[in-house]
Amino acid sequence: MTLFDDPEIAYRLPVASLFDAAAARDFIERAQQARVAGRRLQLAITADGREPQGEVMLNLESGSVGYMVGRAYRRRGVAARALGLITRHAHGLGFDAVTVEAELDNLASIDVARRAGFQLTERAPAMVEDKGRRYALHAWVHRMDRP
């Protein structure tokens, strides 16, 4: 639970701002429902297969991906490696273009996307309102290499 109980994560992502046991149960239940319905794949990022360092997600309907790494594991390349793996998996599933969305001031996330080979698109940003905050999500894309 401490991984997600971080004000910075709550500010950027649609998770409860007090990530307690009830919020964790709800998060896991929603992830399981989305997986069973074939809408989303959410995986823990680990080094040893046990202790979670973060999460990586693939929307199986749109080909968009997302990632989150706990504060203690940042600046180690964890997110870029996980993003690279889930992106290759998405391409393997047939998605020619895989996208990441981020706010322009989320420099850490943008750096992760760039290190994983994503490029900023010219598409208009998606306007989002969440937790009383309105913001623009800009899209970065990774295209499958063609022989």
Image (cartoon, grey):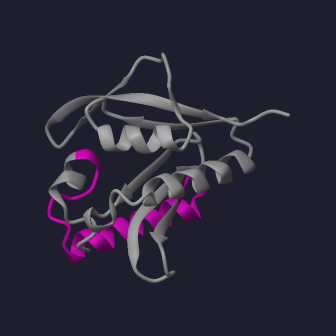
Answer above or below: position of 75 versus 1: above
Q: Nearer the viewer, residue 57 or 77?
A: 77
Please state the horizontal and vertical placement of residue 103, each as a whole percent of the image. Answer: 31, 33
Query: Residue visible at 28% across and 38% down?
Result: 106
Task: Kindly give the residue lying farthest to the right in the view shown.
Answer: 147
Q: Is residue 6 left or right of residue 63?
A: left
Answer above or below: position of 129 versus 46: above
Check if residue 27 falls in the magenta segment.
Answer: yes
Check if residue 114 falls in the magenta segment.
Answer: no
Quadrant of the snapshot with the C terminus: top right
Query: Residue visible at 53% across and 57% down?
Result: 81
Task: Kindly give the residue lying farthest to the front in the view shown.
Answer: 76
Q: Is residue 106 left or right of residue 99?
A: left
Q: Nearer the viewer, residue 144 or 28?
A: 144
Please state the horizontal and vertical placement of residue 109, each as a whole percent of the image. Answer: 36, 43
Q: Is residue 117 left or right of residue 143?
A: left
Q: Is residue 56 left or right of residue 73?
A: right
Residue 93 appears anywhere in the view = no
Residue 48 appears anywhere in the view = yes
Total residue callouts? 0
Please state the horizontal and vertical placement of residue 129, each as a whole percent of the image. Answer: 24, 34
Quadrant of the snapshot with the N terminus: bottom left
Please state the horizontal and vertical placement of residue 60, each as a whole percent of the image. Answer: 60, 49
Query: Residue visible at 35% across and 60% down?
Result: 69
Residue extent of the magenta highlight: 12-41
Answer above or below: position of 104 versus 16: above
